[in-house]
Image (cartoon, rainbow, N blue to C red):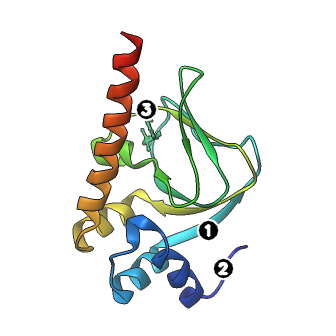
Amino acid sequence: MLLKRRSDRVDVLKKVPLFSDLSRRHLDHIAREADEVKEKKGAVLTRQGGLGREFLLILEGAARVERDGTAIARLGPGDFFGEMSLIDGMPRSASVIAESPSVLLVIEARSFQKLLDTVPGLQRKLLATLSARLRAADVRLASIN
Ligand code: CMP
């Protein structure tokens, strides 16, 4: 389902955990900056080593995060990815591949930076997810060593 009306898109954004605490005004701001894109199963959404140009969030579907060809995480509706390269300016840390037909919310780098600087609480939410991912990676690493 692709939502054409901005008010419909705001309703969808409100249900995304990353945005759930935001005011209607800020959700409207995000809805204006974001595009919805449909992708087929198997589409490469970010490529490891590539340039990071956008932040992506899964509205519908599922994706696999792969590093050097090994799956390291699975993402589903409400999960976001592509933030790392936009934050540190380094190449994409992993490939993200659609595991089913998916609908994504895509925010260009410049808009993403603007949202991080202007939407209260967004940085904190993002950091909480990054902490959770680091914790999960630490657990995996400890179980290997
Ligand atoms: P980025 O490096 O820009 O592009 C690849 C993305 O994959 C990365 O941002 C994160 O959003 C995501 N990613 C990388 N490693 C993990 C992980 N261990 N768990 C979940 N997502 C990850």
Q: Is mark 3 within 8 Å of ligand 1?
A: yes
Q: Check disc 1 and report the residue beneath it.
A: 36
Q: Are marks 2 and 3 in contact (CB under 8 Å)?
A: no
Neighbor class of circle 1 (other Cα within 10 Å; few <14, some 14-19, many 20+) is many
Q: Quadrant of residue 141?
A: top left
**Residue kind at label 1, given as amino acid type:** Glu
Quadrant where the image shows the N terminus: bottom right
Neighbor class of circle 3 (other Cα within 10 Å; few <14, some 14-19, many 20+) is many
x 23%, y 67%: residue: 117
Neighbor class of circle 2 (other Cα within 10 Å; few <14, some 14-19, many 20+) is few
Q: Is residue 89 above or below residue 17?
A: above
**Residue kind at label 2, given as amino acid type:** Leu
Q: Position of 12 compared to 44: left or right?
A: left
Q: Position of 24 compared to 114: left or right?
A: right
Q: Quadrant of residue 26?
A: bottom left
Q: Residue furthest front?
A: 143
Q: Are marks 1 and 2 in contact (CB under 8 Å)?
A: yes
Quadrant where the image shows the C terminus: top left
- Say whether disc 2 or disc 3 marks the residue closer to the N-terminus: 2
The CA span between labels 1 and 2 is 8 Å
Residue 88 is marked as: none
Residue 93 is marked as: 3
The picture places residue 76, in percent across and down from the top left corner, at 58, 52
Q: Position of 135 compared to 75: left or right?
A: left
Q: Is residue 134 visible?
A: yes
Foreground: 110 or 13? 13
x 28%, y 52%: residue: 128
The CA span between labels 1 and 3 is 23 Å
Q: Check disc 2 and report the residue beneath it.
A: 3
